[in-house]
Image: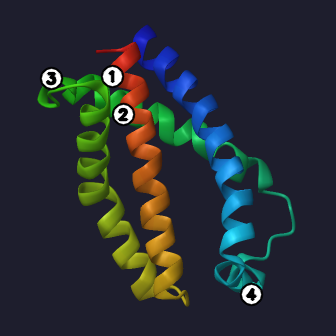
Amino acid sequence: MKKILISGLIAGVILFIVSYGGLFLAIRFFPTLFIEYNGPLFNSDGSRDVLFYMHAFIISLALSWFWDRFKSLFKGHSILRGLEFGFVYAIIALLPIMWISFSALDITLPIVISWFLYGFVQAVIAGVVFAKINP
């Protein structure tokens, strides 16, 4: 349990930094994609902002548990293991949730694709961290 928590928290810090750095870069290089976030679907009164900022830690702890449970299935160098881990997560978790999000919410396909890629990158980074910390 200790390995799960420690690797999850370390991955959470790394994902937090990468996610917010990536957000600023994405806004700079893909500004038209972010115009959609000005719509009523994404407006918040600020009362739940802390939940948004905790996302990197929630996903990292969940992925850390998943890694600990199934790490023996991922073979090779840490980068290869991280990529495979990211692909598995993308197929079993991201694809279904993106499908239902696109079908149920008034969002565009580019937004869904960006969310899918973002989740995949998060899982790959977390997988590489887990492969190094909790092989």
Which residue: 23% across, 42% down?
84
Q: Position of residue 28 (x, y in %)?
A: 74, 68
Report the disc number at residue 39: 4
Report the disc number at residue 131: 1
**Labels 4 and 1: the sequence-earlier one:** 4
**Labels 3 and 2: the sequence-earlier one:** 3
Q: Is residue 1 visible?
A: no
> The C terminus appears in which quarter of the rendering?
top left
Could you give the CA–CA distance between mark 4 and mark 1, rounded to whole angstroms? 40 Å
Residue ID for mark 3? 72
| Label 1–label 2 contact, CB within 8 A | yes
Query: Secondary structure under badge 4?
Result: loop
**Labels 4 and 2: the sequence-earlier one:** 4
When asked about the image quadrant of residue 71, the answer is top left
Q: Is residue 41 above or below residue 73?
A: below
Q: Comparing marks 3 and 1, which lies closer to the viewer?
A: 1
Could you give the CA–CA distance between mark 4 and mark 3, rounded to whole angstroms? 44 Å
| Label 4–label 2 contact, CB within 8 A | no
**Labels 4 and 3: the sequence-earlier one:** 4
When asked about the image quadrant of residue 2, the answer is top left
Could you give the CA–CA distance between mark 3 and mark 2, rounded to whole angstroms? 13 Å
Q: Is residue 113 above or below residue 70?
A: below
Q: Position of residue 69 (x, y in %)?
A: 24, 26
Residue type at numbered disc 2: Gly
**71 left or right of 114 in image:** left
Residue type at numbered disc 4: Gly
Residue ID for mark 2? 127
| Label 3–label 1 contact, CB within 8 A | no
Residue type at numbered disc 1: Ala
Report the disc number at residue 115: none
